[in-house]
Structures are given as C-alpha cells and as structure tokens.
Image (cartoon, rainbow, N blue to C red):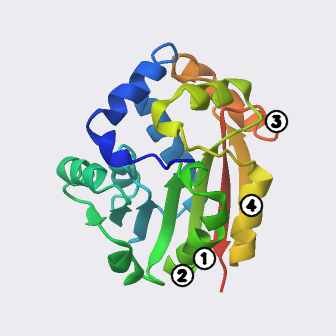
Amino acid sequence: MKKVNFDEYSKNYDDIMQNQHKKFGDIKYYAEYKIKILSNIVKRRNQKLKILEYGCGTGRNLPYIVEAFRESSVFGFDISKESLEIARQNNKEVKIIETNEELASYNGYFDVIFIAGVYHHIEPSLRDYVTSNIFKLAADNCNVAVFEHNPHNPLTRRMVSTCEFDKDAVLLSKKELQSIFFKAGFKDNGSAYTLFFPPVLKALSFLERFLKWLPLGGQYYIAVKKSV
C-alpha cells in the first residue's frame, strides 16, 4: 500500500476535512473536544509542563493546547515538512521540531504527549518501533493520550474509506492500541469511546460520559503513563 504524502495535502487539508464533514458541523469542534479530554486526563493545567503533540500536522490542535495549558511549553512534531511550516506560521508560541534526529534529543523530556489520528497511518509492522521511541521521549510520570478512529463504527469506516488522505489507513481497535503501548512499557491510565455526537449535536455531548463504555463512538482514546 502506497503511503500518503501529507506534504501534498498541507495547503488544503482543513478544507478537505471540512468538506467531508460539512453535514456534521465545524471541524474545529473536534480539536477543542480532544483537548478538553486531554485536560481532564492530565489534571495539572496550572503547572509548567512540557507538552508534545506527536503528529501535529498543520497545527489544528496546537492553539487549544496552548490555551488549555497556559503555563506550559508546547512543542509540535510531524514528518510532513510542508505541514510543519503551516503549523509554525499559525502557532508562533509553539516550538516546532522538524526531524527525527532533533526529536531524539528530547528523550526523557516531555511531561505530556498528545497523539491524535496518527496510528492508523503508521504501517502496522512499524507501530511497536514508533511507540518505543515515544516511550523514550516521555519523562517519568508522563501522561500520554492517544486518539484514534473507532473501526467498530460504520460511519467512521465509511468516512475513512472515502477520504483521499486516508488511502493508507489501517484502523486498529482500542484493545490493539492499548496492547502496543503496554508492550512498550506504559501503564494503563484509562480509556473511553468518544464522539457519539457530531458538532451539530454538541448540546448532547454531556451524555457521552455515560456512553464511554459503548464501542460505537466515532473515535476512542487510550490514556497511559510512564510510571517511575
């Protein structure tokens, strides 16, 4: 399967996403939604943390991270150089990490690592290797939150199959993702199914805390820690 080159989509990534989701509402909701969950997981918002978004793309999530963790230093990394340039232009207060070599210089540095919609693009045979490198980046007691598409949701599968930059996507279940992170040495810190309601129905989002066990949400997240 040919890997998607995100450099080719960097300039119109958000437009493609918004067009695909036009029936459901503004895609900014998804970024804000995830960072609210991240804030609840970390519970250290007033501390001076070092936060990495691994796979930040064009930086759609970064403003919400900066807003939620105002005392913290925020970093972004991605393999798409064109996407990183856009992220840099739109997020002047964020430190952009451009290469794997530079990223490795931060081993043991980060207190929080946020990963959203990345693992379904990683070739399955490379997922253990990538996760072992993420473990190296994590400081002791680092919180890691990973969001992924839920393969049990038929609408999610449909949208992935028709999205032009998801041509290389291989979806994985919550259990599979947890297994990868546990194998790397991380400890369980909770998980839930999410996004039962799209932006146009966000008034009902308060119900999601009662549904997090139900494997029908559009996405899910796992939370793990690097315990001392």
Q: Which residue is mark 4?
A: 178
Label 1 SS: helix
Residue carrying label 2? 136
Which residue position holds label 1? 132
Assign the C terminus to one quadrant of the image. Answer: bottom right
The Cα atoms of the two marked residues, 2 and 1, are separated by 6 Å
Q: Give, as a three-letter code, the residue at label 1.
A: Ser
**First in sequence: mark 4 vs mark 1:** 1
Q: Is the Cβ of the residue at disc 2 closer than 8 Å to that at disc 3?
A: no
Q: Mark number for residue 214?
A: 3
Q: Position of residue 187 (x, y in %)?
A: 73, 72
What percent of the width, then of the height, locates residue 220?
67, 44
Give how far apart the Cα atoms at labels 2 and 3 are. Answer: 33 Å
Of mark 2 and mark 3, the one earlier in the sequence is 2
Identify the residue shown where x is 58% and y is 64%.
Answer: 144
Q: Nearer the viewer, residue 111 or 57?
A: 57
Q: Nearer the viewer, mark 4 or mark 3?
A: 4
Given the image, on which type of amino acid does mark 4 rest?
A: Gln
In the rendered image, residue 41, in percent from the top left (x then y), is placed at 60, 57
Helix, strand or loop under label 3: loop
- Label 2–label 1 contact, CB within 8 A: yes
Residue 199 horizontal side relative to residue 216, left or right = left
